[in-house]
Image (cartoon, rainbow, N blue to C red):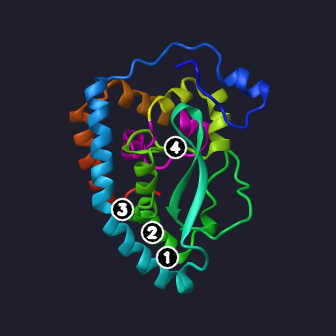
Amino acid sequence: MNSFRFIESDPRFFAEATREMAPLQVGGGRSFWFMKRIFDCLFSIFLIPALLICAVLLTIVNPFLNPGSLLYVQKRMGKGCTSFSAYKFRSMRSVSKLERGADDPLESDRISMAGKFIRKSRIDELPQIINVLLGDMSLLGPRPDYFEHAREYCVSVPNYRSRYSVRPGISGLAQVRLGYVEGTQGTHAKTAVDLEYLRNASFRQDTALVFETIRCVAMRAGA
């Protein structure tokens, strides 16, 4: 847990981010994590038709209610604290560069008319099954943060980088329990719940999390 690699980091940050800490005891065992990866791939393949249908529908709707590109690609922190490109259906007005800081609130004024529905229904997350198939993500696990914000949280939030001892997830325990959280204070709470998920990793917990995720999607809960 003390050998995380940071891409594009300066020496000062690297020293801070890799300082000695108590290792997290991740539960589950080898068989659990192996079967979890198999399930991730099979279920992601099953979701490909839904992804294609949504892509076609959004291509038709976007010019009227959400002008701009179909997909949004953002650099996020992945397993081992390395970066990867996460794919989402775009729900916000495009900007040349993300200006929001790690403690700034969500720029809700940028969410388009169609984007409000896309976010509430979680359709925006569907392209991340591509990330699952590429091995960047899992269906269930700690949600990955924007890479530059995550770099800051690694220094300011105790044990935050332990969240990245496994592949991050499209849905996670903190997401269904806490909903959308912002800033360092919210990330403290999110980290505590994610570490609980990792310590108690099991088929039973993941099964319960699947049903909780379905409930959240059906109730259109969260941001």
Q: Residues within 10 Å of mark 2 (few under 14, many from 20)?
A: some
Numbered label attached to residue 220: 3
For disc 2, the marked residue is 118
Circle 1 — which element? helix
Amino acid, disc 3: Arg
Q: With respect to residue 126, does 20 lie above or below?
A: above
Query: In 3D space, how far apart are the residues under numbered discs 3 and 2 (Cα atoms)?
Result: 10 Å
> Which label sits in the foreground, 3 or 1?
1
> Which label sits in the foreground, 4 or 1?
4
For disc 1, the marked residue is 114
Q: Which one is earlier in the sequence, the residue at label 4 or at label 1?
A: 1
How many marks on residues?
A: 4
Q: Which one is earlier in the sequence, the residue at label 2 or at label 4?
A: 2
Circle 3 — which element? loop
Q: Which residues are magenta?
A: 167-189
Circle 4 — which element? loop
Q: Tell which of 90 and 193 is nearer to you.
A: 90
Circle 2 — which element? helix
Identify the residue at image location x=58%, y=33%: 81
For disc 4, the marked residue is 144
The answer to whether the residue labelled 3 contacts the one labelled 1, judged by CB atoms less than 8 Å apart, is no
x and y percent of residue 216 in the render? 32, 55
Q: Tell which of 109 and 173 is nearer to you.
A: 173
x and y percent of residue 34 in the render? 30, 33
Query: In 3D space, how far apart are the residues under numbered discs 3 and 4 (Cα atoms)?
Result: 21 Å
